[in-house]
Image (cartoon, grey):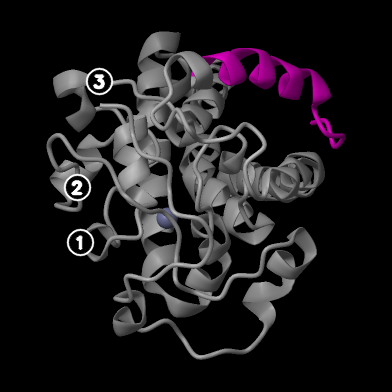
Amino acid sequence: MEYLPDLKRLLLLVVVFVPAERLLALRPGQKLFRRGWANDLLYYVANGPIIGLGISIVVLGTIVMAEWLVPESIREAVASQPYWVQTLEVILLADVGFYVAHFAFHKIPWLWRFHAVHHSIEELDWLAAHRVHPVDQIITKGVSLLPIFALGFSGVAIAIFGLIYGWHSILLHANVKIKFGPLRWLIASPEFHHWHHANHREAYDKNFAGQLSILDVVFRTAYMPKGRMPSRYGTDDPVPHHYLSQLIYPFVRRKPRKPSENMSPVISGNSLQPVKE
Ligand SMILES: [Zn+2]
């Protein structure tokens, strides 16, 4: 695994998403260099190596443990399935893990302090997707990948999943108006995930899935009101604005979030640009 920032991938993301966010803009008035863009770029550059190292440790630990705990016959049966079946199974299993970890990051106050950094995004776009505290990212991805590596899925299926997940997770944050039609209740769309980031009381703790919105339908946490998009994103928690302050923010003692503290209609910063009808 590479521990240097992937600048080729960054260039590819710019080439794909910058024009897409112009052509298909959800909020046409939102600037390319919106507030906090440099901070989110710093996340891309600095977080990748930290997260890569953390996840490598989790994965290696899982593989070693699985050799002891999971019978060889099960691992062989899993790996002998066709790649397309394995890929679908990996997407489903990984997203159940993602849902559980993400749910815990919302519901357990000390975990929420890490996840609040991601929810401090007030203008969503492809670059903002990278604003994730490394502890949040390592635990969430670790929980998500643990059963995948423990059960011995083939490297090909895991690589295909990784490629799809990588682009899908960025698309979900992008400032694009792409409708998935009825499929939005099966596959996570930008509309689905923008509501997860909404600073609207009725949208708190909704839409936890990373790829399969049907998990939220099954667990009764789905929220996508017809014909509406959020009028504000973010959290009322006092998350600082800069990378290093955000990294230490969860470790600073403070009162846990109370639901009533999130009822304020007032948010700091600029109001959102209107959506394209
Ligand atoms: Zn969240």
**Residue 124: where, in percent of width, then height?**
49, 42
Q: Residue at x 51, y 71 (%)?
A: 111
Main SS class of the magenta portion in the image: helix
Pointers 3 and 2 in contact (C-beta within 8 Å):
no
- The residue that mark 3 highlights is 180
SS at badge 3: loop
Separation of residues labelled 3 and 1 (CA atoms): 22 Å
Residue 41 image-quadrant placement: top right
Question: Given the image, on which type of amino acid does mark 3 rest?
Answer: Phe
Question: Given the image, on which type of amino acid does mark 2 rest?
Answer: Tyr
Separation of residues labelled 1 and 2 (CA atoms): 9 Å
Label ID, residue 202: 1
Q: Residue at x 29, y 62 (%)?
A: 204
Q: Earlier in the sequence, mark 3 or mark 2?
A: 3
Image-based side of 174 in relation to 245, left or right: left
Image-based side of 273 in relation to 9, left or right: left
The foreground one among 110 and 232 is 232
Quarter of image, ligand 1: bottom left
Q: Where are the magenta residues, as a range?
A: 1-20
The foreground one among 81 and 22 is 22
Q: Determine whether 88 is above or below 52 in the image.
A: above
**Residue 38: where, in percent of width, then height?**
75, 44
Q: Residue at x 52, y 45 (%)?
A: 146
Q: Determine whether 231 is above or below 245 in the image.
A: above
